[in-house]
Structure formats: C-alpha cells, structure tokens
Amino acid sequence: MATALESSATLLDQLTDGQTTSLRLTQDCLDRIAAHDTAIGAFLHVDSEPALAAAAAIDRRREAGEPLGLLAGLPVAVKDVLATRGQPTTCASRMLQGWVPPYDAHVVERLRRADAVLIGKTNMDEFAMGSTTENSAFGPTRTPWRLDCAAGGSSGGSAAAVAAGMAPLAVGSDTGGSIRQPASFCGVVGLKPTYGRVSRYGLVAFASSLDQVGPFSGDVRGAALLLEVLADHDPRDATCADEPVPAYRDQLERPLDALRVGICRDHFTEGLDKDVDEAVEAAIDVYRRLGAEIHDIQLPHARFAVACYYLVAPSEASSNLARYDGVHYGARSDDYDGLVDMYCRSRGEAFGAEVKRRIMLGTYALSAGYYDAFYLKAQKVRRLIQQDYQQAFTSVDVIASPVAPTPAIPLGSLVSDPLQMYLADTYTISANLAGLPGLSLPAGFSDDGRPIGLQLLAPPFQESRLLQAAAMHERETQWHLRRPPLAEDSS
C-alpha cells in the first residue's frame, strides 16, 4: 500500500495509475499521526474528517475524468503560523489559542486550488521565535530520528511530519533558518525561497522584512513541486514580486554544466561539530567528482550577521506584536485593575518567555536615543552583508555550507541559554538578511544516527539553479532514501 514515506512524485504516479486513492493515502497519514504523534509532537491540530471528505471528493473527480491540480490529492501539513479558514491558527501561543480565521492565507488558497488535502496544522516555536520548537506553548516537537532530541525550529512540526511519514509534503516559514535548520535536524529537504517569491498574505508576522514561506519534502523533486504551487504574485502583499514562476520540476534533470560552488572557509572553524564538518566536506567532494569547480569566497561581514539579525528581527517583532494587547487582538486577562493593568496582564500571561525577551530587545533597540545606535546601524550592516553575497555570486553559481553547527540537539540543552540558541542560526540568518533563496538537503548522519544537512544558497530568484544543484547531489547519494526507525516500524 502506498504510504507518505514514499516520494510525492511516486505517490502522484500511483494516484494517477489507480494503484492507490487519495482517501487511502490520507487515512494512512492519519493512522501514522495517531500512532506516533504523541511521542513526536508534530501537530497542534489534525483536521481528520474534513481531510477525508476532501480526499474522497478528489477521488470522485479523478474517477470522473475531471482535471485536477498539481497536488491532485496529496496530503499537506501546514505550519500553524498560516491562516486557515475553519481551522485553528494559534502560532503555538496562548495569545491566539482557539482563534479560527475567517479566511485563508494566500498559500493556503493556492494549496486548495492545487487539490491538496490539508491534513492539519503543525507545531512551531511560539510566533516562530526559536530554533528548537521548545518555545511552543503546547509542548516541543522531537526529531523522529531521536526522540530525546529537538526537531529544530521554528518549523519543527512541519519537518518532523514529513520525516515520520505523517504527510508527504509540508509548508513552513523561515525568518532566520526556520525551514532549513529543522530540515537538517529531521533529514528532509527544506527550501526558503527568495524574499518576495511567495506571498506573505495570511502569514502571521514575526519580522516582516525577513519572513518567507517555503516547502518541506522528502526529496528535491517534491520541494520543486510544492514551490510551483506556493510561488505566485499576490497584489495583497506589497512585497510579493511580480516574477514569472518557472516549471521547477521540468528543469531538475538538466545538468548544470561547469557548476561553480563557492565555499567560505570561515564557516569551517571552531565550533563546528566534527561529524557536520566531515559530512559537508563529503558533499562538496560529490560536486567535485561531478566536475564542478570549487572556489573559495570571502564574506567579510558574515561575522556580524548574528548581531545584525538579533537587532532587526526583534525590532520588527516588537512592532508586529504590539497589536496583541487583549483589546485589538489576542487573549485578555480575566483579572485586572484598569486599562493599563489589563494590557500588562494580558501580554504577561499569554506570551511565553522567548517572545517577551525578543519584544523587550526590539523595543529597546527602537527606543529614543538608541534607534541610530542599534536598529539603524544594523540595517547598514545588513546592506553590507547583501553586497558581500552580490560580489560572491559574480564568481560562483551557488554557495555551500553547513546548515547548523551540530546535528539535532538534546531537548532542554538550549532552553536556559538563549545566546547559544541564537548562535545555532549562524549559518542560516545571513540568507534572510540578504533576501536569498536557500535550501537544506540530506547530506549524511552523525556517528550516533542524527541527520546532517547541506545548505546551498543562490542569487535572488534563482530557485531553479538551487534545485538543479541540489538534485545533482541527490542523484549521487542515498541519504534522502533513509527513514527513521520510528517511521519504518509502521510501514
């Protein structure tokens, strides 16, 4: 029987050929969620009955010979930061607990038009602020490969759902690595598109100049398929670029002749785990064997990326989250004395510790007398980081690096050390600051069996190049075919 552990391309072929049905596939996903999600914690809401009804309706249309969308009955999980009509959207926060939007995010509209089966909403760090999904108000997400380790964040639920075979495809968002890092920790493919490639309409904002929606899949072809669905010009999002959307899947088999891969040696220094170092170097050797030219590049301002990001992102978060005051939006305290006390108690009770920390950082950085010294200076450094990449891409086609300094980390190891948690994003955040597309693909395992990802970056709106380069590596290796023992037990 077809299961969500198989690739989306294989599943689409089986659906088309009548070897399985969307109803059976959706039921298999729901069975896997029921069997394993108590241990993993990938989902905050499972939309069982509507999902089964949607799958049955798609099967009837297929049987009647009606045209179907690109996803044609595939179950898709959606991060709980995207508005879904008729389903809760909580951002894993008590501030929005129980909120059911009356509208769909643009990407959810696109999924419905592509005949996806929306199976549920996935867990995340509260308001997407975190790197482990432990900041969720409703419990952490664990990587299916090691239940004592975090799935990464903030899109940990989406990554874990794909890795465990609970959905063949999932949607996440990436503000500083929140797609790529959990993809690495869970051994799947995760892609952050160029800023503006995908509409942010209906995405609950964390840092508006950094946030971007993107796909998770078990392989590169699935990521290309889902990106084709998600990418679209949307006039409701003023930052959404009016750029044509290529047929990404059709370009995957085209070899990238004379591919030039850039390596910044500053990425391979103290603090990088030995297993990660070896896996990434082995991945670079794969490109070398395929005839790619490997070039050393310089990113002189990359060392300032963490400091820059943790001024820009909290500042924007402080502004975006000001609306959650118990009056305009969000939960209201039941016990207060006057308006100001109501504001204070509502925000104090409903926001978690990390969200409060970032709001305070951002409010301070934007305050009178500090704006020029902190936020404005960070924006100037951001421009320098962007210029470094522009210069690098004059001599290389893609840039390869680790995704994270370590494989999946033990639960609880960073909760009380926010600085170390912030440093876990050191390889990913500069792509958000520069607005670049970035991808994580499986590239190996640590000695104790934790997945390791390779990060590839490309120039703006060069997702095709990024996917082609990733597909070259995937064809030469078997890492993407491995499945966590938890998933294999029920296959």
Image: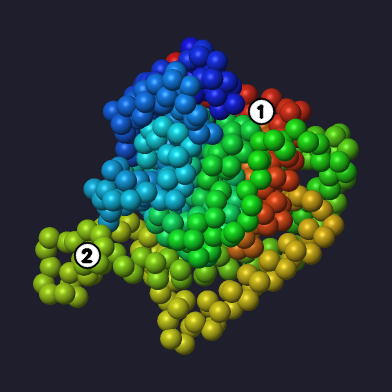
Per the model, the C-alpha gap separating discs 1 and 2 is: 48 Å
Name the residue carrying label 1. Answer: 479
Where, by quadrant of the figure, is residue 115 drawn? top left
Name the residue nearer the viewer: 224 or 64.
Answer: 64
Say which amino acid is labelled 2.
Gly
Residue at x 70% of width, y 45% of height: 464
Whole-percent x and y of residue 282?
Answer: 77, 36
Say which amino acid is labelled 1.
Trp
Q: Element under label 2?
A: loop
Name the residue nearer the viewer: 47 or 295.
Answer: 47
Look at the picture and state if 192 lies above or below 373. Answer: above
Mark 1 packing: few (<14 Cα in 10 Å), some, or many (20+)?
A: many
Name the residue nearer the viewer: 98 or 461.
Answer: 461
Report the disc number at residue 202.
none
Where, by quadrant of the figure, is residue 247 drawn? top right
Residue at x 72% of width, y 68% of height: 387
Residue farthest to the front, as pictured: 65
Look at the picture and state if 447 lies above or below 272. Answer: above
Name the residue carrying label 2. Answer: 326
Name the residue nearer the viewer: 460 or 179.
Answer: 460
Whole-percent x and y of residue 209?
Answer: 52, 65
